[in-house]
Image (cartoon, helix red, strand yellow):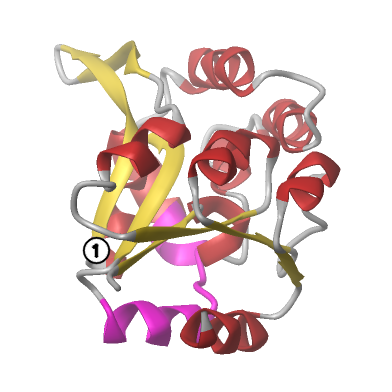
Amino acid sequence: MTTAYCFDLDGTLTRQELLPLIASSVGLEDEISVLTAATINGVLPFDKSFKLRVRLLRDARLDWIHAALNKQVEFDSHMLDFITSRPDQCFVVTGNLDIWVRPILDRLGIQSFTSIACMEGGRLSGIEHVLHKGDAVDSLRDRFDRIIAVGDGMNDVPMFEAANWRIAFGGTHAPNPLLVKLSDFVINDGKALCRLLSML
C-alpha cells in the first residue's frame, strides 16, 4: 500500500507561523498576527483573511521576506528526518504564497502545493489562485492508496476531510478545536508524531 504524507507548513513543519515573520520585515507584525490568530482559530475564513494579509504585505520586498525567513525559520528536526527519508511520499500543503515561501520549500526539497501570486513588473499585485487544501489531497489519489494529513489550523480542515488518516499537531500552538474533532490522533511532539507516522 502506497502512502502520501501531507504536511501543513506554518507551525507544523516550521516552529513558527511564517506570515508574522514576513510582516516583521515591513513593521506590520501586530496587524498580521491578529489576522493570523483569527484564521487559525476559525474566526475569519482563510480565503478572506489571506487576501487581507496579502494586501497589507503587497509592497514588502521579496529579498527582505526571503532574508527574514531564511534567518528565523526553524524546522522540527524529527519531521525533517522523516521527510528526508521519504522525499517521494511527502508533500507540503500550504495556503501561503509561492513567491514568499519558495526558499523554505527549497530547503525541504519535496513537492509542494501553494497559493499562487500574481506578479506585475516584478512586484506582487495580488493572488492568482488561493489553494484549497482538499484539492491538493484529491490530486494525489491517482498515485497513492492512502493519504495521511498533518496540520494545526482551520484552513487544514479541507485537507483533513479529504485524507484517510488525520493528525492534529500541537508542537507550536494548540491545534484548532474543529480540527481536533476531525482528527484520528492529536500529537504535540515531533518525535512522537514521526513514530506514529512510521507505524500507520
Q: Residue at x 45, y 35 (%)?
A: 133
Q: Residue at x 34, y 38 (%)?
A: 138
**Residue 105 on the magenta span:** no
Quadrant in the picture for residue 70? bottom left
Q: Percent from the top left, x then y, of residue 198?
A: 48, 86
Residue that sits furthest to the left in the current view: 121
Q: Percent from the top left, x then y, of residue 159?
A: 51, 41
Task: Judge by depth and name the residue closer to the eye, 36 or 23.
Answer: 36
Q: Main secondary structure of the magenta part?
A: helix
Residue 5 horizontal side relative to residue 191, left or right:
left
Give the mark count.
1
Q: Is residue 100 visible?
A: no
Q: Residue at x 71, y 70 (%)?
A: 171
Task: Judge by depth and name the residue closer to the eye, 53 or 165.
Answer: 165
Residue 59 horizontal side relative to residue 41, left or right:
left
The residue that label 1 is drawn on is 110
| Residue density around tag 1, few if under 14, some if 14–19, many if 20 or more, within 10 Å | some
Q: Percent from the top left, x then y, of residue 89?
A: 27, 68
Q: Residue at x 35, y 31 (%)?
A: 61
Task: Judge by depth and name the residue closer to the eye, 146 or 157.
Answer: 146
Q: Is residue 167 visible?
A: yes
Quadrant in the picture for residue 38? top right
From what the image shows, is residue 33 above or below residue 50? below
- Span colored in magenta: 69-86
Q: Percent from the top left, x then y, of residue 157?
A: 63, 37
Q: Quadrant of the N terminus?
A: bottom left
Q: Which amino acid does label 1 sit on?
A: Ile
**Residue 78 on the magenta span:** yes
Task: Judge by depth and name the residue closer to the eye, 95 or 122.
Answer: 95
Element under disc 1: loop
From what the image shows, is residue 25 above or below residue 70? above
